[in-house]
């Protein structure tokens, strides 16, 4: 089987099956062998690894992964692609395709079943409409995942890797930074896909920490603070947080905590780093639990 990762083969396969890319599933197929190579190289996948691929499409990236890895488990939501994958991946005996919504599968069970509970690597050209829910599910599932190397919308890649003071810094930067060290691997132009997406793309690598980057007494409370802070970016933290009744804090209490941390009491969320959000959360938590 010739590689699919070029426009002629991709069009041929789609026309053989009378198919076209489905917008509702975020289908943009990779047709650039340099990008496919670049993703696999950046992922660091070796013949000892088990890879979870999300959204194999017609199998373009899957072929490269099957050659580099010991085992590939690919989860694809689109039922009509299952016979296509059986055809395009017929030469590989180390690929298992699961027809499921990745947001509904039990990632932990996949790690157990296919890699005896040893950490896996996630590699994917993600459907852009659900990038954040997928990334958060991978982290929050607690499943043993060593790294996540994924193609995402360029703007989302920027939000993942930025720190305080940057316009792209926000709750996604902090959520990702809590679990992993994020770095951008490469920018990818729309011409590397069929059909071309309306936005630029980039590959990011998230290398998971053994332990979260900061210690915090109540993770959920901290993330509610972070979400609130960036939902109302232009407001001071004391206004934003006291407006969200579910946090159960007053403006004065937030200002006191900020002052005690040596910060300006009129600080906005975008100036705080993860460590400072953890400190702020721990300092406000007693008000929440008391009320
Ligand atoms: N990997 C292929 C490639 O690079 O050419 C296709 C990538 S395409 C951007 C995203 C893929 O994810 C599509 O095959 C789409 O059907 C699949 N997909 C979309 N939503 C999904 C979901 N919730 N669970 C699993 N797969 C999904």
Image (cartoon, rainbow, N blue to C red):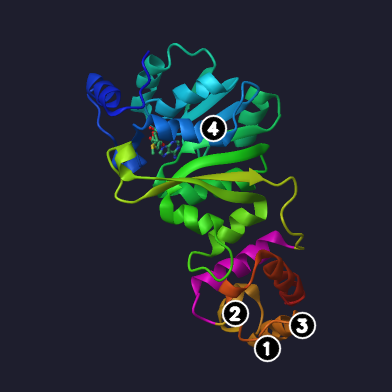
What residue did someone put label 2 on? 237
| Disc 4: CA contacts within 10 A as few (<14), some (14-19) or many (>=20) | some
Alpha carbon separation for disc pair 3 and 1: 12 Å
- Residues at circles 3 and 1 in contact by the CB criterion of under 8 Å: no
Q: Nearer the viewer, mark 4 or mark 1?
A: 4
> Which circle, 1 or 2, is nearer the viewer?
2
Which residue is rendered at x = 28% and y = 28% of the image? 7
Q: Which residues are magenta?
A: 218-235
Label 1's element? helix
Question: Residue at image x 68%, y 85%?
Answer: 255
Q: Residue 135, how many percent across, how many down?
A: 54, 47
Q: Are dots 3 and 2 in contact, CB under 8 Å?
A: no
- Secondary structure category for the residue under label 3: helix
Magenta stretch secondary structure, dominant = helix
How far apart marks 4 and 1 lie (CA) works out to: 51 Å
Which of the marked residues, 1 or 2, is nearer the chain's N terminus? 2
Tell me the quarter of the image containing the C terminus: bottom right
Which mark identifies residue 41?
Answer: 4
**Eye-nearest disc, 3 or 1:** 3
| First in residue order: circle 3 vs circle 2 | 2
Q: Which residue is mark 1?
A: 252
In the foreground, 165 or 239: 165
């Amino acid at each position: 089987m010739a590689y699919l990762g070029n426009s002629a083969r991709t069009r041929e396969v789609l026309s053989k099956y009378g198919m076209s890319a489905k917008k509702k599933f975020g289908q943009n197929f990779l047709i650039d062998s340099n990008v496919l190579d670049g993703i696999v190289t950046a992922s660091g996948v070796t013949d000892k690894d088990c890879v979870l691929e999300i959204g194999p499409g017609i199998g373009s990236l899957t072929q490269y992964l099957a050659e580099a890895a010991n085992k590939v488990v690919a989860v694809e939501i689109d039922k009509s692609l299952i016979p296509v994958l059986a055809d395009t991946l017929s030469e590989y005996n180390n690929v298992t395709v699961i027809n499921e919504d990745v947001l509904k599968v039990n990632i932990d069970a996949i790690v157990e079943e296919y890699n005896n509970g040893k950490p896996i690597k996630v590699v994917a050209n993600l459907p852009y409409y659900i990038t954040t829910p997928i990334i958060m599910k991978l982290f929050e599932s607690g499943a043993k995942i060593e790294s996540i190397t994924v193609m995402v919308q360029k703007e989302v890649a920027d939000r993942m890797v930025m720190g305080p003071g940057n316009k792209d810094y926000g709750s996604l930067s902090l959520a990702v930074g809590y679990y992993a060290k994020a770095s951008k691997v490469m920018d990818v132009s729309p011409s590397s896909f069929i059909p071309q997406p309306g936005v630029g793309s980039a590959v990011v690598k998230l290398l998971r920490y053994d332990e979260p980057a900061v210690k915090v007494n109540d993770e959920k409370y901290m993330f509610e603070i972070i979400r609130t802070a960036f939902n109302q970016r232009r407001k001071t933290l004391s206004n934003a947080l006291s407006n969200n009744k579910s946090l159960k804090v007053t403006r004065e209490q937030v200002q006191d905590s900020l002052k005690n941390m040596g910060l300006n009491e009129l600080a906005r969320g975008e100036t705080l780093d993860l460590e400072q959000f953890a400190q702020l959360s721990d300092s406000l938590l007693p008000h929440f639990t008391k009320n």
